[in-house]
């Protein structure tokens, strides 16, 4: 197995939760999302994640599945990455999962001025021929536009 891909996955999880300089820290860090102390060791993470539900080495290497912490922790505010709380989901299912305490309600304003409220950025982007990274950038800088669309947060948190 290409261990580098799991190393990257592990590093990204830790960075999202603890590294204030990391690009996605504002979404995860300080939002009641942590990593179980056991998983602060890569080798513990490595051994555990291959035993989690839906693990498939080939799908992981092809980027078809992703590690998810939300599905098993629905309606739980303080989420944790651990061998008891995580599982593997398809990229589509993982990105489409909307019951997350850290997701914010977003207002999208189309080029013709119509308003659309949504929470799932990935799904909205797909349905409107947009890309979620560009929507995210527009949310960070209100002067930016993506294919003529404007985006703003309209609610702090969905609990």
Image (cartoon, rainbow, N blue to C red):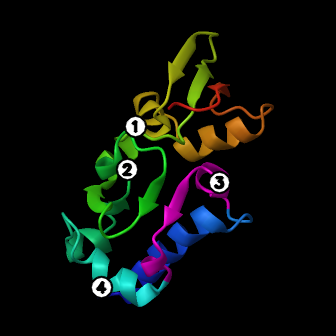
The crowd level at tag 3 (other Cα within 10 Å; few <14, some 14-19, many 20+) is: some
The crowd level at tag 4 (other Cα within 10 Å; few <14, some 14-19, many 20+) is: few
**Disc 1 versus disc 3: distance between alpha carbons?**
18 Å
In front of the other: 18 or 117: 18
Say which residue label 2 marks. 70
Say which residue label 3 marks. 30
Magenta span covers which residues? 23-40
In front of the other: 139 or 72: 72
Asked whether the beta carbons under mark 1 and mark 2 sit within 8 Å of each other, the answer is yes
Against 126, is 23 above or below?
Answer: below
Residue occupying the far right of the picture: 143
Against 34, is 107 above or below?
Answer: above
Q: Residue 58: horizontal and vertical position, in percent? A: 22, 74
Q: Of marks 1 and 2, which one's residue comes earlier in the chain?
A: 2
Q: Secondary structure at mark 4?
A: helix
Against 150, is 67 above or below?
Answer: below
Asked whether the beta carbons under mark 3 and mark 4 sit within 8 Å of each other, the answer is no
């Amino acid at each position: 197995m290409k261990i580098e891909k799991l190393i990257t996955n592990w590093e990204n999880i830790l960075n999202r939760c603890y590294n204030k300089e990391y690009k996605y820290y504002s979404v995860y860090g300080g939002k009641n999302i942590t990593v179980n102390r056991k998983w602060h060791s890569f080798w513990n993470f490595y051994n555990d994640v291959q035993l989690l539900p839906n693990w498939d080495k080939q799908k992981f290497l092809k980027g078809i599945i992703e590690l998810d912490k939300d599905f098993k922790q629905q309606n739980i505010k303080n989420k944790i990455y651990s061998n008891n709380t995580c599982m593997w989901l398809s990229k589509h299912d993982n990105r489409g999962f909307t019951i997350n305490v850290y997701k914010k309600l977003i207002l999208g304003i189309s080029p013709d001025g119509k308003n659309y409220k949504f929470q799932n950025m990935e799904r909205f982007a797909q349905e409107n021929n947009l890309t979620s990274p560009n929507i995210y950038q527009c949310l960070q800088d209100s002067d930016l536009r993506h294919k003529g669309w404007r985006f703003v947060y309209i609610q702090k948190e969905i609990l």
